Every structure is written in C-alpha cells, then in structure tokens.
Image (cartoon, grey):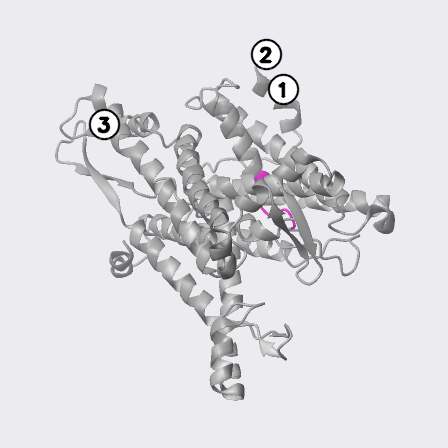
Amino acid sequence: MRFLDVFRPAMRLLPEITTPDRRIPFNERMVWTATCLFMFMVLGEIRLYGMEKGSTVDPFYWLRTLMGSQQGTLRELGVAPILTAGMIMQFLYGSRLISADLSRKEDRALFQGAQKVIVVLVALVQASLLVGAGAFGPIPTIGGLNALLLVAQMVTSSIAVMAMDELLQKGYGFGATGINTFIAMSVCEQILSSGLSFKTIDVGRGPEKEGVVLALFQLTFRDGISGLKEALFRTGAANVLTLLATVLIFALVNYFQVFRVELPVKHVKARSHSGMYPIKLFYTGGMPIIIYAAFMANAYLISQILYSMFPGVKLIRFLGEWEYSEFTGYARPTAGLAYYFSPPQSTVSIFTDPVNLIVFASSVPIFCGIASRMWLNVSGTAARDIARQLKDQQMTMRGYRDSTVISVLDKYITPCAIVGGVVVGAIAVTGEILGAVGTGAGIILAVTTIYQNFETMYREGGIPPELAAALF
C-alpha cells in the first residue's frame, strides 16, 4: 500500500467540489468569485467565541498580510493551513518520499485529497498551538471548554476556506487558486484602509485620521508645516512616504510583469494555424513568496512557543529570543535566527545592525528562487507538462522535432522560474525595507493575481479589446 492510500478513509469525510461538467458562463464565474471573496471577508469580521476580552497577543503579526488572516476572528489562521499543507506535499513529492504520477487522473485526485486531509491536521495543530500559547488568554482563565471551542472554530473555518479555494480552482470562478485571490483581496483591503480610512486614532499626538490622504489634509490644515512633516514621517500608522513606497513597488511589479519570452508554435495538421507560446519572467507568479510566508509563519510560531516554555535553553535561544510589547500587542524577535531572518525593525536598525539587513535581504531571494524551481514539479507547469499539453492540443514548436520540445521548453521555463523567483524575493525585500503598505510581498501577490485574473477574463471575452491592449 502506498503512503497516499492511508488518507483514503479520511478523504471521504471532507467536502469535495466536483469538476463542472459544462462550460461555466462568464457572468456565473464572476458571481462565484465575488461570493467567495465576500464570504472570506465575512470570516474576518466574526469574532472568535470564547477568547478573553482585550487579548492582544499576536504571534502571526509579522505575516498576517501574506496569510490573509485577521486576528481574533474566524479568519485567524487565514490560508496558512492550506499553504503549509501544500509546502509539505511539495517537499514529500519533490524529494520522492511519496510515489505518485500526477499525469494520471487517479493519482492526481489522490494527491489532492491527501493534501486536503493534511490541511485539516495542520489547522488543528496551529489552532492548538495558538490556544496553548495564550494568544486568546490563559487557558485557566478562559476555561477548557472555551479552549476546545476556539480550536474547533478555527479548524471549521479553515475547512470552509479550503472549500472556497477548491471551488475557484475547479473553474467555477476566476483565479488559478483561491489562495492568491484571497490574499490579493486582503492586501487591497489593507492598502485602501491605510490610504482612505476615516477612522480616528490616537498614538500619542492627539486625534488624527488613520487614512494617509485624510491625515495629510487634516494635519496640514491644523498644524501647518509641522503637520505636513508629521503626515510625511508619522509613526504608529501609515504615512505619506510609506504610501509612495507602495506606489513604487506597484510600478516595479508591473514593470517586470510584462517581461516574457514568446516561442513560436504551430498546429500539427493545420499548418496555417500558428501562434506564440508566452513564458513570463514571473512564471510561477507570486507562489514563491507564498511558500516563504507559510514557512516563516510556522517557524516564527514554533520559535515563540519554544522560547516561552524554555527561555534558558541555549539551542532555543539560538533559534530565536522574543520580546513582547504591551503597546503593540505582538512579540518581536530580538536575537537568534528568527531575528536575523526578519526584516529590519526600523530605519535606524538598518545602519546599527547591517548584518540583519544583509541576512534578510539575501535569504528571501534565495529561498524564493529555490521554491519557484521546486514548484514546477508539483504544479503541472514544468517543461514536460507543457509539452504534454501542446501535444494534446495537436500543437508543436515550429522548427523543432517532437523529441526535442521538452528540452527546448526547459531551456526557457526553468531559468524563468528561478530568476523570476529571485526577482520576486528582491522586490519583496525592497518593499519591507521601504515600509510599503501591505508589504512588498503582499503587493507582488496582489498585482500578479489581479493581472492573471484579467488575462483569464480577456480570454473569456469579458474585457473590451481596448482595455486589454492597454493591460497586456
């Protein structure tokens, strides 16, 4: 019996979205996509039952944007369980610890079913760790029953998110994966809130608007030049410079988004039927940074819990030392690997501790390049998979024999995947250092996802040619 067969009994207990047996009309796909996004947003508005009032411990603070999560709500875990399960399955398959031929429909279904079971297990572990770490209040205070209810709520909502992700993946909506679409929505929501929020906040300087644009006018009219300076450089909330950094990262991503290599293809029988097959620089899209976020979210959570339990053990301190701030409501790494692999915590720290900057700025692009290369093997986008798709469509590359198509495709696909992953990581680092709203990684995911969805809509005939010409 194969390893994947172990998951068959549990797979029957989980909801499954069947592949549509008809072509879903454009308007219907729009409705399904909007419905899933609305439901995902609603999960972020419903507070978890049983948590201690005023509890602010937030182990996931650093990566909430990339997880699409919202603290203290049913969206507490966001898409982290799905990302983690995908990363685990990718590692097992890439290292050949599990045997499966993903070109076969049965094996592919079994692989996806096993991944769904692992999503539930990961959600159970992550939820238990959060409750055990006191993220919602000490267990003696909230009680054992409430602790179990908190875990159950997070696991159930993770299953709901998984079902919505599968719904979009199966072709009922737009987006290659629901994960990217959910994260993109979360990023856009954060950027709009930071720029235009009418909410009034007070971070020690008196009442002011949370939204940068409104705060700029409010502070300038109220305090003149000093107010303008405050709007440009204020701390504790987004400022004009961070908003400009966000625009810069958007521009960078859009600039690299159009880089591509186009390979000539033709129909095997109808010689007059030919075209170009594009291979983008961002061949794997924002997936490398998603994998990075999943890895770091789990690493941070484990490091914090271990340090809270065994602060005197040298190995634990080497992995990371953490300091909790009651003002901000989250813990930050102060030493160890967790500190050096985290972004610089202020502009001053860039100059006072350049080692932190060097390690962070080099590790993210390297990780993303490796993750992008590994993703090819499990996503069905490697050279052999594309060659098979072309063959099924009775297409071949112009000027090459069928036996050489895979090697020719691989000559372009693999370098684009690796270099694209490195570029994605470098842009993410730039955004983190500049303090872009939504983080550099989040902006990358938002732009690439929206761009991919526009391309899909264009192919479906839902975008006017004039607009498509401007976009593509």
Asked if disc 2 and disc 3 are in contact, CB closer than 8 Å, the reply is no
Within-10-Å neighbours for mark 3: few <14, some 14–19, many 20+: some
Depth check, mark 2 against mark 3: the one in front is: 3
Asked if disc 1 and disc 2 are in contact, CB closer than 8 Å, the reply is yes
**Against 457, is 89 above or below?**
above
- Where is residue 330? Give x, y as percent: 66, 55
The circle drawn on residue 233 is none
Label 1, secondary structure: give it.
Answer: helix
> What's the distance in space between the residues labelled 2 and 3, CA to CA?
37 Å
Q: Quadrant of residue 119?
A: top right
- Where is residue 145? Give x, y as percent: 85, 44
The residue closer to the viewer here, 278 or 190, is 190
The circle drawn on residue 6 is 1
Q: Residue at x 69, y 36 (%)?
A: 125
Label 2, secondary structure: give it.
Answer: loop
Q: What residue type is labelled 2?
A: Met
For marks 1 and 3, the one nearer the N-term is 1
Range covered by the magenta-colored residues: 76-82
> What's the distance in space between the residues labelled 1 and 2, CA to CA?
8 Å
Q: Read off the residue under disc 3.
A: 408
The circle drawn on residue 1 is 2
